[in-house]
Image (cartoon, rainbow, N blue to C red):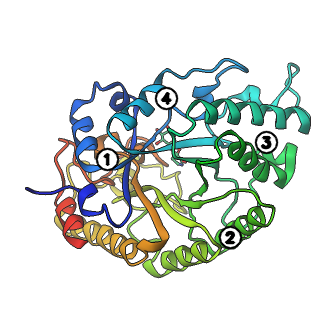
Amino acid sequence: SEGSLKKAYQDKFYIGTAMNLEQINGTDKKSVEIIKKQFSSIVAENCMKSMYLQPQEGQFFFKDADKFVEFGEKNKMFIIGHTLIWHSQAPDWFFVDKDGKNVSPEVLKQRMKNHITTIVSRYKRRVKGWDVVNEAILEDGSYRKSKFYEILGEEFIPLAFKYAQEADPNAELYYNDYNEWHPGKVKRVTMLVKDLKSKGIRIDGVGMQAHIGMDTPSIDEYEKAILAYAESGVKVNITELDISALPSPWGTSANIADKVAYDEKMNPYKKGLPKEVQTQWENRYEDFFSLFLKHKDNIRRVTLWGVSDNQSWKNDFPIKGRTDYPLLFDRQFKAKPIVRKLIKLV
Ligand code: XIL
């Protein structure tokens, strides 16, 4: 048989995917088939974010998340909850009182505690790991000036971990972030890990999102970050892996007047990926998986941020309406040649 990713990597680390609503509801049958065959771990792409789980204060919506967890249990998967405390995709009510003014630190703590406790308890022993805090630290190592930070200061992070630990003492707890290889961020996150540990608060892993491009980061930069996180005393999770095949839009002017010229520059592969770019892209996946295998003892899980290219958020981020090729399955839900190559790499 052709084998599968999850079998090939079973003695190394979990191989996961994010699931969107069509997959969770089972209407996207082709993806569901791929997920069952190829992956040993799942995470919800959106439906466990705070704006969906608690759209109004005290009014929880669990239908989609329940289905997601049931799917994972039925298929014996390592189920990940994403994400408890994040400034983005959070409902406005969380941070303000009825007059629209910031709530007091005490009220925000209470809301965090209620949110975390309600969700983590509901899925106790079923969801095996939680992205407790997402994207709280910037590349230069400073704290993001989110509402959580504005109202509670640095305190909000240990508090979130403490509430999660109390609600399910057996669940693994992670800090998750992007551009997770920037030296300033690595430094601050490793300090955070050590600080939590010295306070006796549980933290099991750092989640490296791994939304990466064709040129950055370098394998060397990435390896340094993996080693630094491991040395701080936690496992590394690769949590949202995708490799964009498109030119990086960061640092380019979004203001090119000529729309056609702009499209040619930033959205050049509408009709398909040229052979040489595809080869480069495959090499990049292989280089990263070789790195993950090299550090398998420190890596708990490698999760892709979706199944097929047509469903990837990268088609709309950070520029809308591009045609990207970041995932392992093509727009016809066919395994790309890279799948075989990654299986053979083990
Ligand atoms: C993205 C989803 O993929 C999109 O569907 C949604 O519109 C926005 O969020 N970092 C994270 C993920 O932690 O939750 C984000 O997911 C991608 C960036």
Label 2 or label 1, whichever lies nearer to me, is 2
Q: Secondary structure at mark 3?
A: helix
Q: Is residue 125 left or right of residue 33?
A: right
Image position of 27 with respect to 259: above or below = above
Sequence-wise, which precedes: disc 1 or disc 4? 4
What amino acid type should be assigned to the residue bearing mark 2? Thr
Label 3 or label 1, whichever lies nearer to me, is 3
Dot 4: within a 10 Å radius of its alpha carbon, few (fewer than 14), some, or many (20 or more) residues?
many
Q: Quadrant of the C terminus?
A: bottom left
Q: Secondary structure at mark 4?
A: helix
Dot 3: within a 10 Å radius of its alpha carbon, few (fewer than 14), some, or many (20 or more) residues?
some
Sequence-wise, which precedes: disc 2 or disc 4? 4
Label 3 or label 2, whichever lies nearer to me, is 2
Sequence-wise, which precedes: disc 3 or disc 2? 3
Q: How far is disc 3 from disc 2 in space, using C-alphas?
A: 23 Å
Q: Which residue is mark 2?
A: 190
Q: Secondary structure at mark 2?
A: helix
- The answer to whether mark 1 is within 8 Å of ligand 1 is no
Dot 2: within a 10 Å radius of its alpha carbon, few (fewer than 14), some, or many (20 or more) residues?
many
Image coordinates for residue 56, horizontal then vertical, percent: 69, 19
Q: Which residue is mark 1?
A: 323
